[in-house]
Image (cartoon, grey):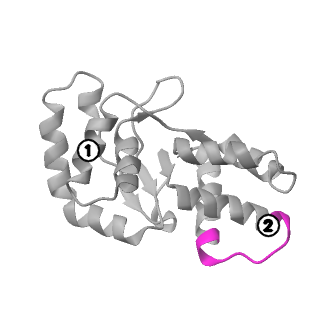
Amino acid sequence: MRCLLDKVTARRTVEGLLKLAEDRDLNEAELFALDLFQRARISDSTLFIVPPTARVLRRIEELPRYGAVIRLFRARAEVLWPARYFTRWARRLREFDFTPEDAAVLALATFGTDEGGTLLGTHSVATLDQPMIQNWATRQADILERLTAMQQDIPSPYHEAALPEVKRPEFITL
């Protein structure tokens, strides 16, 4: 299973790891994010992060307080890179009233790949963004219809892209 963490879920995971290392209390979002992080490790699932999150993590990894925690996180979460048709799909998702950032995350989960280009998309998106989850659930039939229409004119393997599940971390099945 492959799961894309949006930037907030990735941040909550890193914050949770830092709080654990510093023996501080975790909030609910951090607990759920860490639970997903742990379940992914146990189930041998792959977690991915968006490129902007990877850039931020690289910048703060040099800070002594964060280095070890970020290296642990990055050892278990790969970057998902835009593949062909990512931009087109993100633009089409915007027509379903997703913010530009949400559309990019969802498009990456559909038309994203690893560094070696060996996979296409993820099975799920873990987010704490309730409006995005609700919009995805409400408009999913229309979104699928739009993707199916787009797939008629694109080559393999892109015509096999699938829509991910979009859920809170605690509801992601790995």
Q: Residue at x 81, y 45 (%)?
A: 62
Q: Is residue 22 magenta?
A: yes
Q: Which residues are magenta?
A: 20-30
Side (left or right) of 64 relative to 161: right
Q: Residue at x 41, y 49 (%)?
A: 105
Q: Position of residue 96 (x, y in %)?
A: 21, 57
Q: Mark 1 belongs to which amino acid?
A: Arg
Q: Secondary structure at mark 1?
A: helix
Q: Position of residue 87 (x, y in %)?
A: 32, 37
Question: Tag 2 or tag 1, which sits nearer the N-term?
Answer: 2
Residue 71 occupies which quadrant of the picture? top right
Q: Position of residue 164 (x, y in %)?
A: 35, 49
Q: Position of residue 16 (x, y in %)?
A: 70, 65
Q: Residue at x 54, y 27 (%)?
A: 115
Side (left or right) of 11 relative to 18: left
Q: Mark 2 belongs to which amino acid?
A: Leu
81 shown above or below 46: above
The numbered dot on residue 170 is none
Mark 2 crowdedness (10 Å alpha carbons): few <14, some 14-19, many ≥20: some
Q: Secondary structure at mark 2?
A: helix
Residue 19 occupies which quadrant of the picture? bottom right
Judging by the rendered image, the residue that carries numbered circle 1 is: 91
Q: Are marks 1 and 2 in contact (CB under 8 Å)?
A: no
Q: In the image, which is nearer the foreground, mark 1 or mark 2?
A: 1
Judging by the rendered image, the residue that carries numbered circle 2 is: 20
Q: Residue at x 39, y 32 (%)?
A: 120
Q: CA distance from mark 1 to mark 2?
A: 39 Å
